[in-house]
């Protein structure tokens, strides 16, 4: 019975990849006969999973959307990412769903295995939100994120490889203090034992974190909190942004409107790539908005944060404007 249950969970995990599985291939992946596979499929249907079957020589199976949400099978990294996303939403990162996110987060954490619950709780306790961002950022591995969080919680020394902004790599040994979530970035605030000073490290540039096994007495941070320390460090560094955007408009049109401030490269008859260099992201955002065309930001992530913030405020202004009473009491 245990083997059957394990195989059923494995089958569900494969079907939840949302791809179509030929019957023979799916049976081979599970190490069973096609006949046994059919029985396992029937068992999933009895549990409420809508599995679609296609008969014939090329027959196979696919998990369809159902009317209700049955139990999901997710791995440790997916569970951590889910918990982080729900926590961000619960803190107001997504307007209107904070209360529902709190309920969902409580349910998710409650059913986690003890080993995984400990990692997620450490991540929640050791993270200082600096703004309303907070999904697991690009280049940040959920497993590594929890390794760092546990080291912060347990006051255990941490070692890792780090790539600086100029590409130089080094091995670092630190006393970790807190994680900070700022926009789409995650930072580790720690005391660097090599440089004998406090530092902040971008987690997407940090690889192979591992605990040293040595406990330490926490030092006093020279700032109000970890978020303030990260902000102060970022504000002191002069920035030059390299903006890279794909615009859904002909190159000639874009060249005519903003060509004097940017480089425009034709992709095809209806699209072009725009590159700009700027010490501020405000004017690239304004220039792109004035094009009157759809566009996709390829780089930097900070431009996405800025546009998202502007979009929220513009949408709020539009809704308030529509709701404003007219001269005779009705809405404009």
Image (spheres, helix red, strand yellow):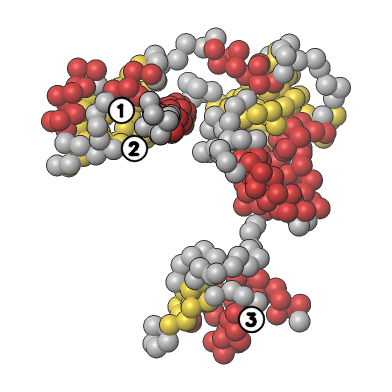
Q: CA distance from mark 3 to mark 1?
A: 52 Å
Q: Which residue is mark 1?
A: 289
Q: Is residue 241 above or below residue 83?
A: above
Residue 318 shows up from this direction: no
- For label 2, the residue is 296
Q: Position of residue 142 (x, y in %)?
A: 63, 44
Q: Gap in Å between the C-alphas at discs 2 and 3? A: 44 Å
Q: Is residue 209 left or right of residue 242?
A: right
Residue hosting label 3: 46
Q: Nearer the viewer, residue 322 or 330?
A: 330
Q: In the rendered view, would you say 305 is above or below 137?
A: above
Q: Measured from the top left, where is residue 31 in percent x and y? A: 60, 79
Please give the name of the residue rendered at 83% of the width and 33% of the height, measured from the top-left corner.
Answer: 154
**Sequence-wise first label, 3 or 1:** 3
Question: Element type at marker 3?
Answer: helix
Looking at marks 1 and 2 on the same chain, the residue that comes earlier in the sequence is marked by 1
Mark 2 or 3, nearer chain start = 3
The quarter of the picture where the C terminus appears is top left
Q: Residues within 10 Å of mark 3 (few under 14, many from 20)?
A: few
Residue 284 sits above or below residue 17 on the image:
above
Q: Position of residue 330 (x, y in %)?
A: 40, 34
């Amino acid at each position: 019975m245990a083997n059957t249950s394990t195989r059923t969970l494995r089958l569900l995990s494969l079907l939840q990849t949302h791809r179509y599985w030929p019957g023979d291939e799916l049976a081979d992946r599970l190490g069973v006969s096609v006949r046994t596979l059919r029985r396992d499929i029937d068992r999933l249907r009895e549990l409420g999973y809508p599995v679609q079957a296609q008969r014939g020589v090329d027959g196979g199976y696919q998990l369809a959307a159902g009317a209700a949400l049955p139990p999901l099978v997710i791995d440790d990294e997916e569970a951590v990412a889910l918990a982080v996303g729900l926590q961000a939403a619960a803190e107001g990162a997504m307007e209107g769903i904070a209360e529902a996110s709190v309920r969902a987060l409580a349910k998710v954490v409650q059913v986690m295995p003890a080993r995984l619950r400990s990692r997620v709780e450490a991540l929640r306790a050791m993270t200082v939100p600096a703004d309303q961002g907070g999904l697991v950022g690009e280049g940040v591995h959920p497993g590594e994120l929890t390794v760092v969080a546990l080291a912060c919680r347990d006051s255990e020394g941490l070692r890792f490889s780090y790539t600086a902004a100029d590409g130089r790599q080094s091995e670092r040994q630190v006393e970790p203090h807190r994680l900070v979530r700022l926009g789409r970035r995650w930072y580790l605030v720690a005391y660097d034992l090599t440089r004998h000073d406090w530092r902040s490290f971008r987690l997407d540039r940090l690889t192979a974190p591992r605990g040293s096994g040595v406990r330490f007495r926490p030092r006093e941070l020279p700032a109000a909190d970890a978020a303030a320390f990260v902000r102060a460090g970022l504000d002191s560094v002069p920035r030059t942004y390299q903006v890279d955007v794909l615009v859904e408009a002909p190159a000639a049109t874009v060249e005519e409107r903003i060509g004097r401030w940017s480089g425009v490269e034709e992709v095809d008859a209806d699209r072009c790539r725009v590159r700009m260099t700027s010490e501020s992201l405000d004017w690239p955002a304004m220039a792109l908005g004035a094009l009157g065309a759809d566009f996709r930001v390829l780089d930097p992530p900070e431009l996405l944060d800025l546009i998202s913030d502007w979009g929220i405020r513009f949408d709020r202004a539009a809704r308030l404007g529509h709701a404003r009473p007219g001269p005779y009491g009705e809405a404009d």
